């Protein structure tokens, strides 16, 4: 039934009342205290309330669909006790703004949580209520996947749940088949072992050429002020080592690996938002090979060193972290908060392998990793990282590995991101497992996989990403991408550096908006600008590999 039109004076009054209500709401929102202001005031936590929202927000008309209602009905929400165990502050504690922001970020790091934030609500007695808002992700997934990269097809199917019965535990069963091998994997993770802050991860992988097993138990540094950490890990594998070149299998051999490690670390300094941790570790790594089989090596390609290795020893560890995180959206994912540290972070180890412990040689080893983020403006982000590792046994430097990576993002207008990435790698006197490739899987998308085998490499990529506002049933968001890649590698056959390879491509990007993975699936076509003899004129890429 439709009523008579309102008089002009009534419509004017309605507009005034609506504007006044909006102004009051704006002022209330603007007057809401920040955690920093509450800390400066000396406020204390008077109450902690946890609100866990379902996967779809049915108050949003775009999500109030039959898909959203069905998913919310089927989904088992995360238990309140699981979230409460992640909250380090208690009723009566003084407000610590850094700790509260860090807690929200830690909550968002769990794959079964899509988004989380903590808001203050002043109470009548002068204390403040901390309202913890959590939105669940869709975690139950039966998958059938297909990808095509570098002219080679891969497919898989499986079943997984990252939040079994709302407990936060993860179980996955998956079968994959790629050009190298077939595998069936069973994986289990428990982020709160027996209701504690200990974690457990276990996996078993049955390979067409062997198997892999792994078990890890740890009490990690969950927050900046966590006083200590302990970790234990063990794994072994029986597989086939394969070295490819120019898309042909050059060498292969059975590979047998056993690893074990244990370590502990302590927080020794916490100055503001900067933490220093020191510790120790004990490591054991045994690697041996079966008979070498020669396939179709390129002339001059040297035979890999398959001498057995037994590396056992101990060392000191350190980590240094500046908590300067900021939250962004629509960089690697879509509609999902992404936390990046704009401070320095570093970690490393320095130790000694010893024959007295059963090692095949005596000498030091070292590992180092550094990262840093910058935000030059409100519309840009730069991320840099580097890592290195080496060992020196009986007067010989071995397995020297290094990496430098820089990624940059620039927002030109809404829903548009210009993204770039540069990567430099070195693998001098490397173990066979650590040699480098150049091809489709490494980011040169217009070329086949396993194109070149080498020990030095650089790869650069530039992408123009444009998102649309089209969201299908609240679960899928569409976008476009145009990109260019370039790279070169120093080959192992003695011919030196290849000439730079380059390609261009374009296609579609689809964001998975509700799942625990928050992945971007791409469907693109890439064209090589320096086509090799016998190479296809283009490569079709289907998959969810997002490198930057």
Image (cartoon, helix red, strand yellow):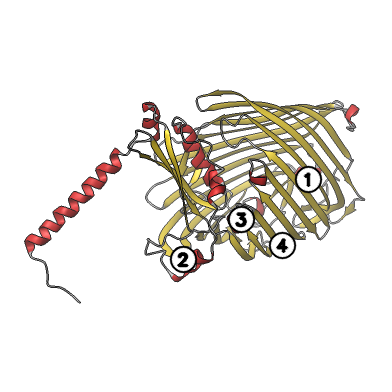
Give the residue furthest to the front: 125
Mark 3 to mark 2 CA distance (whole Å) = 19 Å
Q: Nearer the viewer, mark 4 or mark 3?
A: 3
Residue 68: image tag = 2
Choose the circle earlier in sequence order: 3 or 2.
2
Choose the circle earlier in sequence order: 1 or 2.
2
Residue 433: image tag = 1
Q: In terms of secondary structure, where does tag 2 sit?
A: helix
Mark 1 to mark 2 CA distance (whole Å) = 46 Å
Going 46% across and 53% down the picture, which residue do you hit? Answer: 335
Name the residue beneath numbered marker 4: 176
Going 71% across and 62% down the picture, which residue do you hit? Answer: 176
Q: Is residue 265 above or below residue 135?
A: above
Q: In terms of secondary structure, where does tag 3 sit?
A: loop
Quarter of the picture holding the N terminus: bottom left
Q: Is residue 117 left or right of residue 244?
A: left
Q: Nearer the viewer, mark 1 or mark 4?
A: 4
Residue 162: image tag = 3
**What is the x, y in percent for residue 73?**
50, 66
Label 2 crowd bin: few (<14), some (14–19), many (20+), radius 10 Å:
many
**What is the x, y in percent for residue 175?**
72, 63
Front position in the image: 380 or 82: 82
Front position in the image: 363 or 503: 363
Mark 2 to mark 4 CA distance (whole Å) = 30 Å
């Amino acid at each position: 039934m439709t009523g008579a039109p309102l008089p002009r004076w009534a419509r004017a009054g309605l507009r005034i009342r609506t504007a006044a209500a909006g102004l009051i709401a704006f002022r209330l929102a603007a007057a809401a205290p920040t955690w920093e202001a509450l800390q400066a005031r000396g406020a204390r936590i008077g109450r902690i309330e946890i609100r866990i929202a379902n996967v779809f927000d049915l108050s949003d008309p775009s999500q109030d669909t039959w898909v959203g209602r069905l998913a919310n009905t089927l989904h088992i929400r995360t238990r309140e006790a699981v979230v409460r165990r992640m909250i380090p502050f208690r009723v009566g504690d003084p407000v610590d703004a850094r700790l509260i922001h860090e807690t929200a970020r830690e909550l968002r790091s769990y794959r079964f949580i899509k988004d989380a934030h903590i808001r203050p609500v002043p109470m009548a007695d002068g204390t403040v209520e901390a309202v913890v808002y959590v939105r669940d992700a869709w975690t139950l997934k039966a998958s059938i996947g297909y990808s095509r990269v570098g002219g080679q097809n891969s497919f898989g199917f499986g079943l997984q749940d990252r939040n079994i019965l709302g407990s936060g535990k993860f179980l996955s069963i998956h079968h994959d088949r790629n050009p190298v091998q077939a595998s069936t994997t069973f994986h289990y993770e428990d982020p709160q072992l027996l209701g504690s802050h200990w974690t457990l991860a276990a996996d078993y992988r049955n390979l067409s050429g062997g198997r892999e097993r792994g078990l890890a138990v740890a009490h990690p540094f969950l927050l900046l002020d966590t006083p200590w950490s302990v970790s234990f890990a063990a794994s072994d594998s029986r597989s086939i080592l394969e070295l490819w070149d120019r898309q042909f299998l050059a060498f292969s051999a059975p590979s047998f690996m056993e690893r074990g490690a244990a370590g502990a670390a302590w927080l020794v300094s916490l100055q503001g938002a900067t933490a220093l941790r020191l510790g120790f570790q004990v490591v054991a790594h045994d690697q041996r090979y079966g008979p070498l089989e020669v396939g179709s090596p390129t002339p001059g390609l040297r035979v890999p060193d398959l001498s057995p290795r037994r590396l056992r020893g101990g060392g000191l560890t350190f980590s240094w972290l500046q908590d300067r995180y900021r939250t962004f959206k629509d960089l690697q994912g879509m509609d999902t908060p992404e936390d990046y540290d704009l401070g320095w972070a570093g970690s490393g180890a320095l130790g000694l392998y010893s024959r007295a412990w059963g090692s095949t040689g005596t000498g030091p080893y070292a590992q180092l990793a550094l990262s840093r983020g910058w935000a030059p403006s409100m519309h840009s982000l730069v991320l840099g990282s580097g890592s290195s590792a080496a060992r020196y046994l009986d007067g010989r430097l071995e397995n020297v590995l290094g990496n430098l990576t820089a990624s940059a993002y620039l927002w030109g207008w809404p829903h548009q991101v210009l993204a770039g990435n540069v990567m430099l790698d070195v693998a001098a006197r490397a173990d066979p497992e650590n040699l480098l490739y150049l091809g489709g899987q490494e980011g040169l998308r217009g070329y086949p996989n396993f194109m070149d085998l080498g020990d030095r490499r650089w790869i650069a990529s530039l992408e123009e990403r444009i998102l649309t506002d089209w969201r299908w049933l609240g679960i899928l968001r569409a976008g476009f991408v145009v990109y260019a890649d370039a790279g070169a590698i120093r080959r192992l056959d003695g011919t030196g550096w290849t000439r730079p390879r380059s390609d261009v491509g374009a296609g579609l990007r689809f964001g998975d908006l509700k799942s625990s993975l928050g992945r971007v699936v791409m469907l693109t076509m890439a064209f090589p600008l320096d086509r090799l003899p016998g190479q296809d004129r283009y490569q079709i890429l289907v998959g969810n590999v997002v490198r930057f």
